[in-house]
Amino acid sequence: MQPVRVRFAPSPTGPLHIGGVRTALYNYLFAKKHGGIFILRIEDTDQTRFVEGAEEYIMESLKWCGINVDEGIKEGGKHGPYRQSDKKDIFRQYAGTLVEKGDAYFAFDTPEQLEKLRMDSEKNGNTFIYNSSVRGELKNSLSLKETDWRNLLLQGVPYVIRYKMPLNEDLHFDDMIRGHIVVNTDTLDDKVLFKSDGMPTYHLANIVDDHLMEISHVIRGEEWLPSLPLHVLLYRSFGWRAPLFAHLPLLLKPDGKGKLSKRDGDRMGFPVFPLFWPYGETAKGYREEGYYPEAFVNMLALLGWNPGTEQEIFSMEELIDAFSIERVHKSGSRFDPEKAKWFNHYYLQNRDNNQLAMEFREFLRAKGIHYDIVHLEKLIGLVKERVSFVKDFWQETDFFFVAPETYDREVIKKKWKPETPLQLTELKSVLENIDEFNPSVTEQTVKAWIENKGYNIGAVMNAFRLVVVGASRGPHIFDIISWIGKEETLKRIDKGISITGEQA
């Protein structure tokens, strides 16, 4: 049996869409499941669309996801180079081989001539296709005399090399996800294989590279499904054994129809790229938004693949063990940003409090706030269940670090009574006399005082929380004052009475 060798072959034309990351992930899972090799190949034959920084972005994205490359630009390997632009002369040779065999030809039509043909066809309600029905009337080595087209080559007239599509042949081939497919060649055009700029097109470079790299399975997005007939024919023309193909379903936008795009993310407030893209029109990424790579990968794996069980939480090792191409969906998968948050919430809840404290400490340091890990670890334990991201800890705990400057007017309106300032002043005296300022002692002492005085416990505790926190939020009030300490608690009571009393 042929060893499993798969490749992820992105073009460095901008940030890597999460659909591309999913393609890489499925290739990686398939390879590791079968003890195979995962290759990263950069397909940069279209130099007009090359974007500086995109290549490094792709590699950094895979690294963050834990998708480890076996062979690639940085890793090396015996099947290199792994950047297509580094071997354009090789592709030229293979294009020439097809011409010599009669399966491809030189075409000298100018872009302007072809555009006019397209426009004329559209005026007549047709679509222009460069194939057997028109190629005999156009300027190419099939229609011209050999001496004429060879003279054009000698004169340096720009040309492309096109594949010569067979006449009226039913092509039969199989897809691991979509089953048996039949396409008639008369519906296909003579695709360009080699461009006038001396670079191969995707079609030629892809096939030649896959053969030279001994790729056993091609797992890619369904947008390449229309190209499959040509690719199968190219393998036949070269006399090579074709790999097995699997075309993955699209990732669909959360609402409406169509492929998930950056515009959808901007509109609905979620990223569609794994990492922040810093060039040109910047775009936010899952890493910078606070997602854990494990949560991101877990979420992505289930967008188009079903394990056949109720299990939703998978480690990378579990994904490798459970993954199978046969359980990949044919239809598109609708992206759910709330489900993505759910995955991150799960992974955060199962993270060690000490680790979360260290992560939150970096967030605080950026604000100029410095606390020891032991203190922060206790704080994490108080609010952990409320958050889905480390950055959310600040929203839940800001009052632990900074005394409130404003107080919720709705709470003041509903909870602040004429007797409130006096009760809080008495409460301050009670707290001042507590030596062991921990949650258990303070709660017991304060509640005993409220009961002895005959005060309404709800009224006192609501006012107490208001002056300490600034609003009706946060964990247990006695946990809060234990964390901020007696001195800070007493200061906040004084400040709250002064400011809130004026607003009441």
Image (cartoon, grey):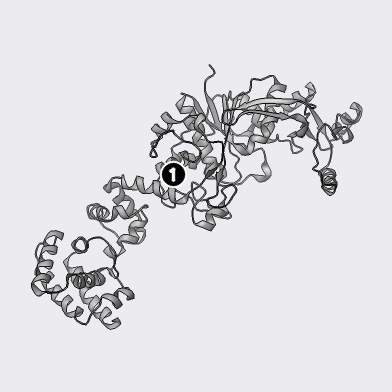
Which residue shows up at 52% across the image and 51% down it? 254
* Closer to us: 385 or 316: 385
From what the image shows, is residue 463 above or below residue 203?
Answer: below
Image position, residue 384 (x, y; %): 29, 53
Q: Is residue 63 left or right of residue 19?
A: left
Q: Residue furthest top?
A: 1
Q: Would you say residue 407 is visible in this rendering?
A: no
Asked if residue 425 is positioned above or below residue 3 in the image, the reply reads below
Residue 303 in picture, x, y percent from top left:
49, 41
Residue 268, visible in the rendered structure: yes
Corner quadrant of residue 194: top right
Left/right placement of residue 124 relative to residue 389 reads right
| Numbered disc total | 1
Quadrant hosting residue 48:
top right
- Measured as percent of width and height from the top left, residue 392 is found at 36, 57
Query: Residue tagged by mark 1?
Result: 296
| Residue 404 locus on image (x, y percent) | 29, 71
